[in-house]
Amino acid sequence: MTEFLDSNVCVYLVEDDEFYLKVFENKFKTSTKYNIFTFNSGESLIEFFRRKPLPTKYVHIVVLDYYLRSMENQDAKNGVEILKLVKEINLEIEVILYSGIEDDSIVSQGIQLGAVTFVKKNENSFTRIHNSIKGIISKHSLELKHTQSRLTIKIFVAVILACLAGLAILYYTNPDIF
């Protein structure tokens, strides 16, 4: 496998606004083959990650709203706090932070904690998030190709060395052949 297929991508949507969550879920399910998981709170995402080890053959991408407090969950952690917990669980999980609030300190803090990007919540959010996901997938595909290339080179060198060793043994045991 030299690239990641859409079916090898898991996208975890975290949004407390039921409308946004359903819109994003529907758009992803109708336009991609990603595995989509939805969460109405960051805490439920963290609980999911702690209960279930993530398969390494997949690219895992969290699309995380910043403001997650609702009438039902006044004590909810914000997206930056959840981002920090996600990275403590697994540094390989990619996170896209988004919000209706565009605050430079939120963006800066999110990027420092490992978010890939910040997307402003508006009518173009889905397109920008989807493009960010495609970029993440491309990056992982390139890393995989690089790893496979290094492995191929190591195998090639090992075969050449084995051949040279065989020739050396043959030379020293039967020098008349040469």
Image (tube, rainbow, N blue to C red):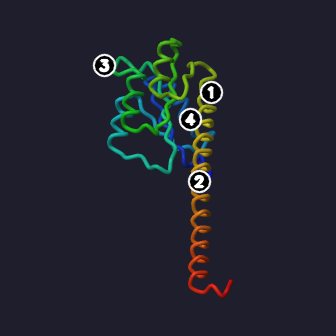
Q: Secondary structure at mark 2?
A: helix
Relative side of 133 to 38, left or right: right
* Quadrant (top left, top right, bottom left, bottom right) of the C terminus: bottom right
Dot 3 or dot 2: first in sequence order is 3
Q: Which is more toward the observer, 86 or 20?
A: 86
Q: Which residue is mark 4?
A: 26
Mark 4–mark 2 Cα distance, whole angstroms, equals 40 Å
Locate residue 68: give its quadrant: top left
What amino acid is at disc 2? Arg
Question: Viewer-nearest of labels 3 and 2?
Answer: 2
Mark 2–mark 1 Cα distance, whole angstroms, equals 33 Å
Residue at 64% from the left image edge and 32% from the top image edge: 131
What amino acid is at disc 3? Asp
Q: How crowded is the residue under tag 2: few (<14 C-alpha within 10 Å), some, or many (20+)?
A: few
Q: Which is more toward the observer, 129 or 115?
A: 115
Dot 4 or dot 1: first in sequence order is 4
